Amino acid sequence: MPAAQLLADLAAALRPSLVTLLPQEQLSEWGGRWLATHGGRLGSKLAD
């Protein structure tokens, strides 16, 4: 699965309402921004 699709799926899972508001490309960008700002905390939770 392409990275863009994974990021769009992440955005949809976190904010389902965005699916009806944003096109696929913008969902991917939103998911990427979310991951960039939360990635460190996510990694530390997975290590626990």
Image (tube, rainbow, N blue to C red):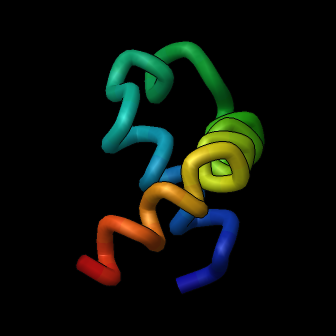
Instruction: Residue at 67%, 44% (x, y): give it.
Output: 37
The image quarter in which residue 40 lies: bottom right
Q: Residue at x 71, y 53 (%)?
A: 36
Q: Is residue 27 left or right of residue 1?
A: right
Provide residue 26's location: percent of width, then percent of height. 74, 35
Counting every numbered tag in the picture gives 0
For this view, does 33 lie left or right of residue 44? right
Q: Residue at x 53, y 85 (%)?
A: 1
Vertical position of residue 42 compared to residue 26: above or below:
below
Q: Is residue 47 above or below residue 18?
A: below
Vertical position of residue 16 compared to residue 34: above or below = above
Q: Residue 38: where, in percent of width, then height?
A: 56, 48
In this orientation, does residue 24 appear?
no
What residue is drawn where x is 31% and y is 76%?
46
> Along the line of sight, which residue is nearer the eye, 45 or 29?
45
Q: Is residue 46 left or right of residue 34?
A: left
Judge by depth and name the residue closer to the eye, 47 or 24: 47
Image quarter of the C terminus: bottom left
Name the one closer to the observer, 41 or 15.
Answer: 41
Figure quadrant of residue 33: top right
Residue 30: horizontal and vertical position, in percent? 67, 37
- Residue 15 at least partly seen: yes
The answer to whether 36 is drawn above or below residue 27 in the figure is below
